[in-house]
Amino acid sequence: MKKLKLSAAMAALAWATISTSQVAQAGEINIIMEEVPDYDIVAKLTDQFTEQNPGITVNFDAMPFDAMRDKILTSSLAPSATYDVIIIDNPWTDEFARAGFLEPLDTLISGQDGYAYEDFVPALADISKVDGSIYGVPYYNYALGLIVRQDIFDSKGLAIPKTIEDYMSVVKSLTTNDMYGAAMQPQKGYKIMEEWKNWLYANGGELFDDSGNVIINNQAAVDALNQYIETHSQAAPPNSANWGFDEALRSVSSGKAATMLSYNWMLPALNAKGGMSGDLAGNFTLHPVPGGKSVLGLWSWGITSNSNNKDDAWTFISWISSPEVAKQRAIMGGAPVRNSVMNSAEVWEKGYGKAYYSALADILDGSAPLSSGNNAEELIEIVGTELSAAVTGQKSVKDALDAAANGVERAIK
Amino acid sequence: MLMNAAQMHIKYKLILPLVFLLFGIMLYPLFFSLWLSLQDYRLTRINDVQFVGLENFGLIATDPSFLNAMGNTISFVVGAVILELILGLSLALLIQKLVIFRGAIRSILLAPMFITPIAVGLMFRFLLNSEIGIIPFYLLKVGISLDWFGPGLALFSIVLIDVWQWTPFMLLMFLAGLEALPKTPFEAARVDGAGRWLTFSSITLPLLRPVIVVALIIRALDAFKVFEYVFAITRGGPGNSTETIMYYIYQTGFRFFRMGEAAAASILLIIFILIFVILIVNLSRPKVIK
């Protein structure tokens, strides 16, 4: 009897494992999601979708970021997709589109009444266009902004820095024995690349020039990296050379650092009463990054080309990203991607106030993606590794950027 | 006793399932990796696989990141295994002398070995975190400020974490080895008036040599596979100071989708490990006095 129970339990476990990765049946769509606050909002809103579309069952498979890329790949290489709808991080867009993993959405978008595709912030919508076709529609943005402790700035009579030189000077002046001017994120790979590229933009630099030549080791990049290292050594907390998002956020929210370059939607979380900042809640404000050009991140909704339920998938995507539902999502705390949402008096009132949405609109205007092209993920890792080596003194600035340029050229061959 | 033809026939039939099993789980993946290493095989261009001969090996062998990862891995293996050997043997000698609580102490000391390495990685990531870690907090109270995952210490920190988790394995092996040693040589040494050090170096160590060699090979092979601590804590950073060969292969194959190059790196690693094992076995053979 005991053996029988054990066998039954094992069979149930095996079935549960298989059933979570099975292909969706007709009238059913499987969606892969990242476990972030925006997913919780989407999951709540989906109850309305299910009421309005009783013939479509939506199954979410939420997971940490690290697990997503592999799962999407295996689903896309299979004859029939496990996931009918995927969310696409912006560095993956070109790679997945060119690999044939994604369904072009142009016809579906143009045939959708009242969808108002042109209402999406152009900088965000453009990320999902590859060779003239649209492969995704914006889900949420993660553009970087400058988050500051406004009470400290006010008490010291400091203006919000507009240039990178001003920022360096301000954060140095704010650094004392128990307070640091800037909580930075020099962790190898994605984090340092995401932060430093704002400094690169402020110096007029880029990864490639208009002809596609690698210019990551030109003078603008050298200046940007020297400024970044100087600021880290003079205004960031000690022993923070391996810090990522969590550590920097904790430093700011606990009152140990006065500024950080971070995701714009961290502002509401930092200012939430009874939240992570304790008594400091309400003292944080959001501004465009010094230099004015922000690194832009985006998650977008896409349909897999090997899905058997493309119509149902589009029914869901066109609903969740429609102007009306986008407004509800923003009011519930989601990061907006439509101009009409950021300019809505209702969203200002019920959401996080006009100041936040105005600052966000400024940030998105003129921002540019972290990296694009076929090997974006690899390029970010290569450059981010060399930047980290320079910040920690393992390589000189010039050697690190030359190595980054060589690595990028090798990767794009 | 000689087998007749029918018995011989049955003998081969009986080992067939094992042959099929070995082929399925070992030889087929190995040969597939070998085939992969000769192709330009990218998971995002699966319909455009091209034979490139030894080009992937050339790319890998000249990639500074691969050479750096090999260097880091060798430093990690040597550092971790030597520390584990010394600590494991010392603890085994101490525990062997215990009269009471021997079983309880042995069980407690073995506990780290049963925790999954990714959990150990996450645990130490927080314990040694400069912002919230309890270890830096108390070290700072006595005036010591260390960046455990900074460029100078990160690899050493990973070594220490491995030592914490896997010294118990060495302890287990050596304790079993010590308990199985014959008593007579030790009694003879005591009668002859040999001191503790002389007894240890001239009797214990030589008799324990086969156990030490096996333990060293098992631990070294396992240490070559270090991945979880790096993945959970440093992602190979700062710079590439903790990037190990397994992390390099994972990144090349499963993040950048360059399966051909990842397979070539794996083949080079297999060759390196084979040479390493042959060297260890040869070096550890007792010298024959002629």
Image: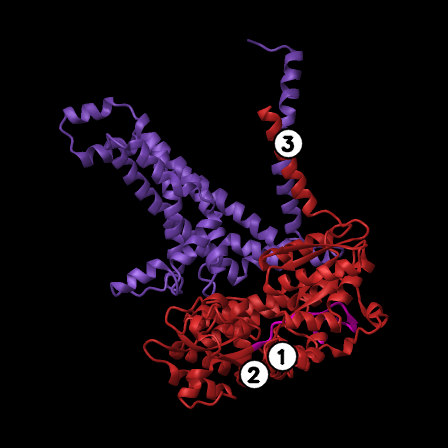
Chain colours: A red, B purple
Left or right, residue A326 beside residue A38: right
Classify 10 Å Cα crowding around label 1: few (below 14), some (14-19), many (20 and above): few
Give whichever of B138, B120 is nearer the camera: B138
Pick whichever of labels 2 and 1 is earlier in the sequence: 2
Q: Which label is found at residue A64?
A: none
Report the span colored magenta.
Answer: A126-144
Residue type (three-letter) at the residue carrying disc 3: Ala
Label 3: chain? A
- Residue in the image at 31% along x and 66% along y: B145
The secondary structure type at the circle numbered 3 is: helix
Residue underneath mark 3: A8
Residue type (three-letter) at the residue carrying disc 2: Pro
Asked if marks 2 and 1 fall on the same chain, the answer is yes
Left or right, residue A71 beside residue A192: right
Give the x, y percent position of residue A170.
43, 86
- Residue in the image at 54% along x and 61% along y: B63
Residue placed furthest toward the left: B193
Left or right, residue B101 beside residue A410: left
Give the total of numbered labels. 3
Q: Which label is found at residue A349?
A: 1
Asked if marks 1 and 3 fall on the same chain, the answer is yes
Classify 10 Å Cα crowding around label 3: few (below 14), some (14-19), many (20 and above): few
Label 1: chain? A
Residue type (three-letter) at the residue carrying disc 1: Glu
Label 2: chain? A
Can residue A196 be seen in this snapshot? yes
